Structure formats: structure tokens, C-alpha cells
Amino acid sequence: MTRPFSARRTLSRCAPSLLALSCWAGAASADVIASDPDTVLKALRAEGLAATMETDDLGDPKIVTHLTGKSNTEFSVLFYGCTDNTDCSSIQFYVAYDMPDPVTALKMNQWNREWLFTKATLDDEGDPGLEMDVILADPGVDDKLFATTIDLWRQSIDAFEDFIDW
């Protein structure tokens, strides 16, 4: 199984291409996904995800959606750095799993050592979660880079679910 962006040595190969994509995205932007939560919602839907806008406990926007294909996993898109519950500077893709047996911190640390761009977490009960942060601050990201981000998230969830024996 190919694990994109999984080994630390991959960073030296991927970082220049991601940087180039990021620079290209800013220069030749078709549709910009920016700090407006509605642009994020539309971009997720454009990638074929059935997404709904909600609000979190602080009143900030939160999008709930799920992947299709191998995994029908539901995940959230959380918004951070918001001003008056809008104009948010970043988002976080987040998924949590309720496991029958606790997962160890050692196992989550193994994921974090081997994978780039996503972070494995544990809650107080030993249930794992997976996060990926995306900066949307001015000037935002273009739709092609956002599509690449969604693809990376899909691949990461598939690999993480195999990793935790979900």
C-alpha cells in the first residue's frame, strides 16, 4: 500500500512540489477558498461531499460531512481564528473514533512520527482522533490546492483506519 507523505524522508521530495503548487495556486487562482465558511462549504460540495453547516459550542461555524468509498467516515471541519464567528483564518479537518479498547499513546506517536500533514490524538478514554490543519488566511487557497488537500485527507483517513484496526 502506498502511503503518500508518510515517511519523514518524503518531506524533502514533497515540500518543494507543495510549495510550488501553493505558489502557483496563488498566482493562477480560479476559485479561492478563503476565510468565509460558505466558500469552504461550497468547495467541499464541489469535491462530491454532502456537507452541512452547523455551529460549534462557541458559535463558530462547523461543517459536518462524510467520506464515500472505502470509508463512510463522518468528520468535521472546525473553524479557528474567527472574528465574530466569521472571517476565520484556518480550518481543521477532524475525525474521532470510539474504540472498544483504548489505543496507546505509543501507537499514536508512531503515526505522528511516520505521517506528515495529519496528527493523531487521544481523548481521555484512549479513543483516537485524526486532525489536519489548513491555513485560509488572506489570500486563501485555490480550488485545485483545496482538492489536493481533500484527497490527502481521504487517503490519511483510509490509512489511519487500517492503522487503528477500525
Image (cartoon, rainbow, N blue to C red):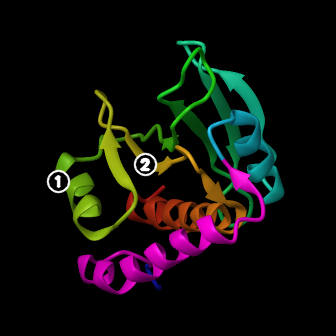
Q: Residue 153 or 135: which is nearer the viewer?
A: 135
Q: How dense is the environment of label 1, judged by Cα within 10 Å: few (below 14), some, or many (20 and up)?
A: few
Say which residue label 1 marks: 106
**Residue beneath the point at 74% across and 51% down:** 44
Q: Residue 20 or 58: which is nearer the viewer?
A: 20
**Residue beneath the point at 55% across and 34% down:** 78
Say which residue label 2 marks: 130
Whether residue 52 is situated above or below residue 15 in the rendered picture? above
Residue 30 magenta: yes
Q: Is residue 151 left or right of residue 43?
A: left
Circles 1 and 2 in contact, beta carbons < 8 Å: no
Stretch in magenta = 4-33
Q: CA distance from mark 1 to mark 2?
A: 15 Å
Q: Is residue 4 left or right of residue 136?
A: left
**Residue beneath the point at 55% across and 45% down:** 138
Q: Is residue 96 left or right of residue 142?
A: left
Name the spot of residue 1 as percent of width and height, x first.
47, 85
